Amino acid sequence: MEPTTLTTERLLLRPFAPDDIPAVHAACQDPAIPRYTPVPSPYTLEDARLYVEERCPQGWREDTAYTFGVFARDDGRLTGSMALIQLKLHTPERQAEIGYWTAKEERGRGYTAEAGRAVVRWAFEELGAERLEWIAEAGNEGSRAVARNLGFRMEGITRALIPHNGTRRDAWTGSLLPSDLGLPTRTPYLPYPDRERPAGG
């Protein structure tokens, strides 16, 4: 897919560019980012270069991940990163997983939720997604707060889902459907209780 750009009241979401490498490197020095996301630790300038110049463009090119750098519109500073991953948009599943991290200095300002609302709308309205997933290590309260702000419904704990630093960790999971936001979907949805009703009932 051709990389795209999204805007919100305060933010610009765009593909990363080489000039962003120092800012990505600086943000990922915060221990909380490698603690809860699959980035190398320690995080080097070369790791940032590979992410910005190779992995992110490859994801757009091969339709495996659509990654946005999230920047403040007033001064262009990096506030975080947001992506759609595990893409199944061209299959009957028509779903993807949303992932994000926020620079330490920018937390608590609502930037990640603001960016997430734009990406969610884009996924449903432009990409035709019919289900979005959110997965985070159990205990990641910050990520869960953002997901709930976006309207994700918590679905429970999946055991041993996330391998991290040589151990498997339990994960919190959630989902968001177009209908949760009052949007149409091309495939009808029949919730579980309705499937259990007797014929003619």
Image (spheres, rainbow, N blue to C red):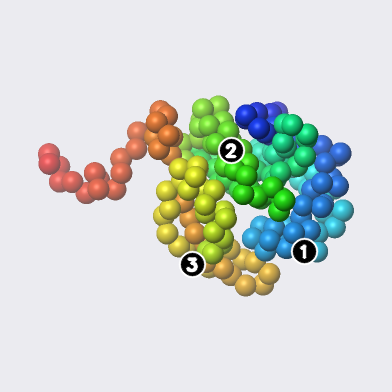
Q: In this view, does 84 lie to the left or right of 190?
A: right
* Sequence-first tag of 1 and 2: 1
Q: Label 3, on which residue? A: 159
Could you classify mark 1 by the number of other residues whose Cα lies within 10 Å: few (under 14), some (14-19), or many (20 or more)?
A: some
Residue at figure coordinates x 52%, y 52% from the top left: 145
At which x and y percent is residue 128?
Answer: 51, 30
* Sequence-first tag of 3 and 2: 2
Q: Label 1, on which residue? A: 41
Amino acid beneath label 1: Ser
Amino acid beneath label 3: Arg
Q: Nearer the viewer, residue 93 or 46?
A: 46
**Whole-number angstrom distance, CA of label 1 to CA of label 2:** 28 Å
Q: Nearer the viewer, residue 71 or 182?
A: 71
Amino acid beneath label 2: Glu
Let me know if residue 83 appears in the view.
no
Let me know if residue 196 appears in the view.
yes
**Whole-number angstrom distance, CA of label 3 to CA of label 2:** 30 Å
Q: Which of 85 and 11 is in front in this view?
A: 11
Q: Label 2, on which residue? A: 114
